[in-house]
């Protein structure tokens, strides 16, 4: 009994760590850009599949597409008639380095198949850049639109990215090796090393994000944009850049959770949506704005999932998604929605 | 040195046009005040210059550079800075972080931070406090301080005295006077005409989106049409009412 319990606990915490990365992604993106990002789970999928193909030594098509997209926007930005000469050169240099980085990591990973961290780097570079492209293509043109419009746009993005994943990688699931094979036995309980990696990296990533947003001027600028967009503009903070940065962080974190999770459930085109939605249920506990409450939410969701999978496996997802109703009721009672914030 | 020339300016929101065919100029080192009743379009004028409400027609030249079409962050980089009426502070961030963010373009050097603290000593005391916990007057000082962090060349202040106790107003005015003495070019929008004209070199009076009066502060203060502009709507109403009664 006790070993079943501890097994379920560990399983739940691992799930929670994955949803934690998702919930943070959702919160960063929502607070800065007001996008309730339905497409968030797709970055999980794309991260895991990019990682799988980079690891197998084939050139990641996504990196190529992303580089092309970045190049198109770079051309447009360099041609901006309001730019001074030195600013133009700076834009050109930064963008070239960025595109080169995405392509170089993809090439390097395809040259050295099986090198784990190179594949991680290539996958994260491609997906985080895809995040910025998504922002510029779909959010920037309608920035200032109501949250409902932004939500519907993200549904469209979900459909496109979902289709793209099938087009590029097909419907076959791919197995992905863990960081380290095996695990450790604690008495009767077996803990896979991968579970420890997932929890460790999730904690590191969250700590890194916290340090970035508290200690650096750019991180504070990101917070400022989330708190007061007009105020941020008046400070000379480029809010478009803040939007791109939030999407890059969100996409990168989600991709990270995807490639860490892939060894446990295989990488496939359909893996993202349920994970993304469960990240939502967890983030909803904090109104998609409060990090600490969301972290309680992810553990709640992760543990509920593993325990319900054990008790009534057919209803696992039903139970997890049903949680959203008490969560919203609770949220409404504790923090009634304001009439309409400015 | 900033030399602002606005001509034929048209600004509005949605389908409504608020100001139309407006001309205004500010010489370098000058303190110019824009006066007018509520709804005259004073804030809209500043939002138009700042690119928050993109102008629909006209031209805003600063040293022969066209400002229309630039984004707010590009204007801040050029030294055009606005202290908005709503202050637009970052309430859940500390006073110091608010100030540092004001200097985002320049990397917020501690030298400029020290200058703000010597200008507003109370902010130094409150540096670790969240901006939302400050009093109204302190928030206004923080808003002015944050704007100064970016090293402005043209500072625009939107009703800095609104809703503040007379003592605090004195404090803010002292700093504005000091900035003017340092040679900063300033546009001061105010409802309190007497206050503004006591400091300004020149003034403009705005009435429903048009400039109805302009001139040096001294002659504006003495002009009976100034108080009429503030009571303009009421005067029209009185005239209309008299007419109805006569009929």
Image: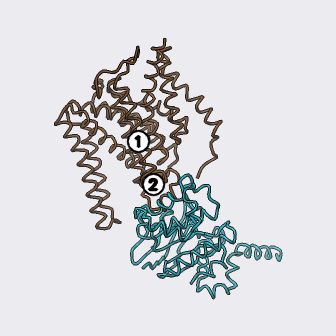
Mark 1 Cα-neighbour bin, 10 Å: few <14, some 14–19, many ≥20: many
Q: Which residue is at 49% across, 54% downward? A: A224
In this figure, which residue is indicated by the disc labeled 2? Answer: A221
Circle 2 Cα neighbour tier, 10 Å, few/some/many (<14 / 14–19 / ≥20)? many
Assign the C terminus of chain B to one quadrant of the image: bottom right
* Residue B240: quarter of image: bottom right
Q: Is residue A100 above or below residue B185?
A: above
Q: Nearer the viewer, residue A7 or A262?
A: A7
Compute the Cα span from label 2 to label 1: 16 Å
Count of numbered circles on the image: 2
Residue B235 to residue A289: above or below: below
Q: Secondary structure at mark 1?
A: helix
- Chain given the colour brown: A
Mark 1 lies on residue: A250
Residue lying at 56% horizontally and 52% vertically, measured from the top left: B92
Are discs 2 and 1 less than 8 Å apart at CB? no
Q: In the rendered image, what is the letter of the chain coloured cyan?
A: B
Q: Chain of mark 1?
A: A
Mark 2 vs 1, N-terminal side: 2
The coloring applied to the image is: by chain
- Residue A44 against residue B120 in the figure, above or below: above
Q: Residue B168 sits in which quadrant? A: bottom right
Where residue B49 sits in the image (x, y, percent)? 49, 69
* x and y, in percent, of residue A16 in the image: 45, 29
Q: Give residue A177's position: percent from left, percent from top.
A: 27, 25
Q: Quadrant of residue B124?
A: bottom right
């Amino acid at each position: 009994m006790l070993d079943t319990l501890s097994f379920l606990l560990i399983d739940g915490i691992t799930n929670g760590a994955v949803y934690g990365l998702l919930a943070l992604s959702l919160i960063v993106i929502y607070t800065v850009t007001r996008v309730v990002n339905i497409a968030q789970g797709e970055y999980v999928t794309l991260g895991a599949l990019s990682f799988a193909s980079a690891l197998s030594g084939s050139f990641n098509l996504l990196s190529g597409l992303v580089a092309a997209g970045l190049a198109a926007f770079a051309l447009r930005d360099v041609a901006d008639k309001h730019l001074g000469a030195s600013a133009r050169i700076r834009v050109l240099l930064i963008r070239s380095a960025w595109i080169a980085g995405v392509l170089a990591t993809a090439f390097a990973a395809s040259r050295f198949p099986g090198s784990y961290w190179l594949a991680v780097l290539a996958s994260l570079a491609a997906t985080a850049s895809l995040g910025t492209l998504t922002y510029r293509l779909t959010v920037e043109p309608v920035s200032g639109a109501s949250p409902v419009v932004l939500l519907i746009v993200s549904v469209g993005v979900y459909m496109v990215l979902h289709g793209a994943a099938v087009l590029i990688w097909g419907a076959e699931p791919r197995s992905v090796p863990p960081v380290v094979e095996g695990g450790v036995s604690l008495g009767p309980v077996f803990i896979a090393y991968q579970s420890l990696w997932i929890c460790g990296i999730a904690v590191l990533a969250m700590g890194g994000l916290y340090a970035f947003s508290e200690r650096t001027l750019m991180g504070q600028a990101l917070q400022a944009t989330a708190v007061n967009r007009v105020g941020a503009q008046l400070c000379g903070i480029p809010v478009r850049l803040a939007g791109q940065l939030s999407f890059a962080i969100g996409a990168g974190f989600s991709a990270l959770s995807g490639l860490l999770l892939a060894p446990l459930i295989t990488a496939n085109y359909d893996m993202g949506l349920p994970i993304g939605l469960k990240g939502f249920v967890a983030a909803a506990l904090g109104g998609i704005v409060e990090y600490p409450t969301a972290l309680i939410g992810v553990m709640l969701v992760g543990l509920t999932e593993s325990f319900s999978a054990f008790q009534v496996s057919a209803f696992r997802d039903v139970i997890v998604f049903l949680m959203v109703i008490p969560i919203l009721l609770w949220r409404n009672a504790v923090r009634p929605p304001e009439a309409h914030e400015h | 040195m900033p030399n602002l020339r606005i001509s034929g300016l048209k600004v509005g929101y949605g389908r409504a046009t608020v100001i139309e065919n407006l001309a205004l100029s500010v010489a370098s080192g000058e303190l110019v005040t824009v006066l007018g009743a509520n709804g005259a379009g004073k804030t809209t004028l500043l939002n138009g210059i700042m690119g928050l409400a993109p102008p629909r027609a006209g031209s805003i030249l600063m040293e022969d550079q066209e400002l229309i079409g630039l984004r707010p962050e590009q204007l801040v980089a050029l030294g055009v800075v606005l202290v908005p009426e709503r202050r637009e502070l970052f309430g859940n961030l500390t006073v110091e972080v608010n100030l540092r963010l004001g200097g985002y373009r320049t990397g917020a050097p501690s030298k400029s931070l020290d200058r703000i603290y010597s200008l507003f000593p109370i902010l130094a005391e409150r540096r670790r406090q969240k901006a939302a916990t400050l009093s109204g007057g302190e928030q206004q000082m923080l808003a002015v301080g944050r704007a100064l962090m970016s090293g402005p060349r043209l500072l625009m202040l939107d009703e800095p005295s609104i809703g503040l106790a007379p003592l605090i107003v004195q404090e803010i005015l002292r700093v504005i006077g000091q900035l003017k003495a340092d040679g900063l070019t300033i546009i001061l929008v105010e409802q309190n005409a007497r206050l503004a004209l006591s400091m300004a070199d020149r003034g403009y009076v705005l009435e429903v989106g048009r400039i109805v009066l302009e001139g040096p502060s001294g002659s504006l203060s003495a002009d009976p049409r100034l108080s009429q502009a503030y009571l303009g709507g009421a005067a029209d109403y009185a005239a209309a009412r008299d007419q109805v009664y006569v009929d």
